[in-house]
Every structure is written in structure tokens, then in C-alpha cells.
Image (tube, grey):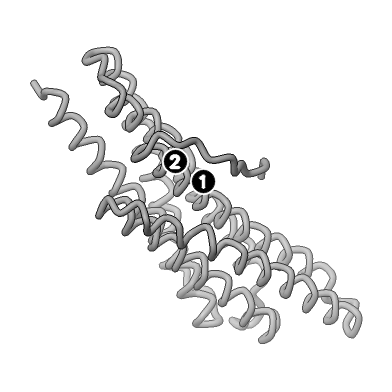
């Protein structure tokens, strides 16, 4: 039977596993956008990653509740467990968003090419930026370096700017080609989902600050 420290180690390992699976989901999107064509095998991998994250969320939720009930941990460990509950919830939401983005990209592909080179470039920049932010959080969590999370707060604004650039570009294309409207709506939703993921990663970083320092930051994301 595990003691408290052993149980916390297992919870941490499974949380890191979930972080890595969620990041792999974003990485798959980034690969597809940079290739400019849809890859069915990567899409299949993404769906499996989503299922894995769903399972990990359930396992971690149960483990955290059992740990609190069994050991009645002191302030620092209790704060960690409460923080983990929120982190795994956010990771599961990111996993859902990853699959949603890929479904939209799949519907926007025609003759194996993405809808528009300019739009593709902006979306690819967004996926790359989100991936960079996510990996920054991952490094902070694994290496327990809280200062790394502060980079996340600065990079989030860059994703917002790219989203706005994407919307402006789509508007210009629609002015020239009215037939693009149906695809334009999908592109805008993809851009908004990327922005949403960046917001959730910021939430993850704020929860990590809470875990390490007990500081409750004020940033809150809106519903999807």
C-alpha cells in the first residue's frame, strides 16, 4: 500500500503523461498545417490521444479524491492536489479542442490542398505559437521552475494578435470571392479555438503558480 509521498509521485507521473498527450495533439495539428494537407493517420492518432486524456482525467480525479480522504494532507500537499484537479480538467478541454480543430481542417480540405495559402500560413503560425506556449508550461511543471510560467503570460497576447490577423485576412478573401464564405466561418472558428487553447494554457500556468506559491491569480477564461 502506497504512502502519501508515493501516491503523490504517481499522481504527478500521470499528470505529466496527460500533459504530454495533450501537447502531442497540438503538435499533430501543427504538422498537418505545415504540410498543407490532411493526414488521416495523424487524425486517427489524435482521436486516440483524446480517449487517453479522457481516461486519465477519470483516473486522476478518483486518485486525488481518494488521496485527500485517506491521508487528509497538510496545506502544501492539499494545494497541490486541488491544483491538479483543475489542471487535468483543463488538459481534457484542450484535448477536445484539438480534435475539434482537426475536424474543421478536414472539412476545409479540397483536392488535398488547404483552402488558401495566406490563411494556411497564419493558422500555421498560430499552431506553432500555441505549441511553444504549451511546451513552456510543460517544462515549468516537470522541472518545477515557476519562473518559466511567466513567459506564458506574455506569449498569450501574440496568439490573440494572430487570431485577429486571420480574421482580417479571411474578410479580405470573402470580399474577392463570395464563394469562400462557407469555408471562412470554419477558418475563423479554428483561429478562435487556437486562441481558446492559449487561454487554457494560461490557466494551467496560473494553477501551477497556485500550487507552488499559493497565489490565486485573477485570469479566467470564458466558456467555449
Q: CA distance from mark 2 to mark 1?
A: 6 Å
In the rendered image, the vertical position of residue 173 relative to residue 90, given as above or below: below
Q: Residue 125: percent from the left, percent from the top?
A: 57, 76
Q: Quadrant of residue 11?
A: top left
Q: Which residue is mark 2?
A: 207
In the picture provided, is 201 more to the left or to the right than 68?
right
Q: Which disc is residue 108 wearing?
A: none
* Helix, strand or loop at mark 1: helix
Q: Quadrant of residue 78?
A: top left
Question: Which of 206/125 is in front?
Answer: 206
Task: State yes or no: discs 2 and 1 in contact (Cβ < 8 Å).
Answer: yes
Task: Say few, some or many: other residues with alpha carbon within 10 Å of mark 2 (under 14 / 14 to 19 / 20 or more).
Answer: many
* Helix, strand or loop at mark 2: helix
**Which residue occupies 53% across, 74% down?**
38
Residue 69 in view (yes/no): yes
**Which residue occupies 41% across, 39% down?**
88
Question: Which of 24/70 is in front?
Answer: 70
Q: Residue 8: percent from the left, percent from the top?
A: 21, 32
Q: Quadrant of residue 219?
A: top right
Residue 45 in view (yes/no): no
Q: Which residue is mark 1?
A: 203
Question: Which of 23/116 is in front?
Answer: 23
The image shows a total of numbered marks equal to: 2
List the single residue furthest toward the left. Answer: 1
Amino acid at each position: 500500500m502506497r504512502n502519501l509521498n508515493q501516491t503523490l509521485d504517481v499522481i504527478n507521473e500521470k499528470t505529466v503523461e496527460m500533459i504530454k498527450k495533450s501537447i502531442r495533439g497540438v503538435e499533430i495539428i501543427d504538422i498537418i498545417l505545415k504540410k498543407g494537407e490532411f493526414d488521416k493517420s495523424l487524425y486517427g492518432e489524435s482521436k486516440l490521444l483524446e480517449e487517453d486524456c479522457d481516461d486519465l482525467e477519470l483516473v486522476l480525479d478518483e486518485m486525488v479524491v481518494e488521496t485527500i480522504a485517506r491521508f487528509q494532507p497538510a496545506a502544501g500537499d492539499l494545494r497541490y492536489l486541488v491544483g491538479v484537479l483543475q489542471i487535468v480538467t483543463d488538459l481534457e478541454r484542450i484535448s477536445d479542442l484539438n480534435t475539434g480543430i482537426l475536424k474543421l481542417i478536414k472539412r476545409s480540405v479540397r483536392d488535398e490542398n488547404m483552402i488558401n495559402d495566406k490563411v494556411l500560413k497564419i493558422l500555421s503560425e498560430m499552431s506553432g505559437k500555441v505549441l511553444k506556449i504549451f511546451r513552456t508550461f510543460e517544462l515549468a511543471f516537470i522541472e518545477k521552475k515557476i519562473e518559466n510560467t511567466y513567459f506564458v503570460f506574455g506569449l498569450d497576447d501574440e496568439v490573440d494578435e494572430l487570431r485577429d490577423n486571420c480574421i482580417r485576412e479571411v474578410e479580405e478573401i470573402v470580399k474577392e470571392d463570395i464563394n469562400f464564405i462557407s469555408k471562412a466561418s470554419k477558418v475563423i472558428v479554428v483561429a478562435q479555438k487556437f486562441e481558446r487553447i492559449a487561454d487554457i494554457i494560461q490557466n494551467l500556468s496560473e494553477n501551477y503558480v497556485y500550487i507552488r506559491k499559493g497565489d490565486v491569480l485573477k485570469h479566467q477564461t470564458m466558456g467555449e
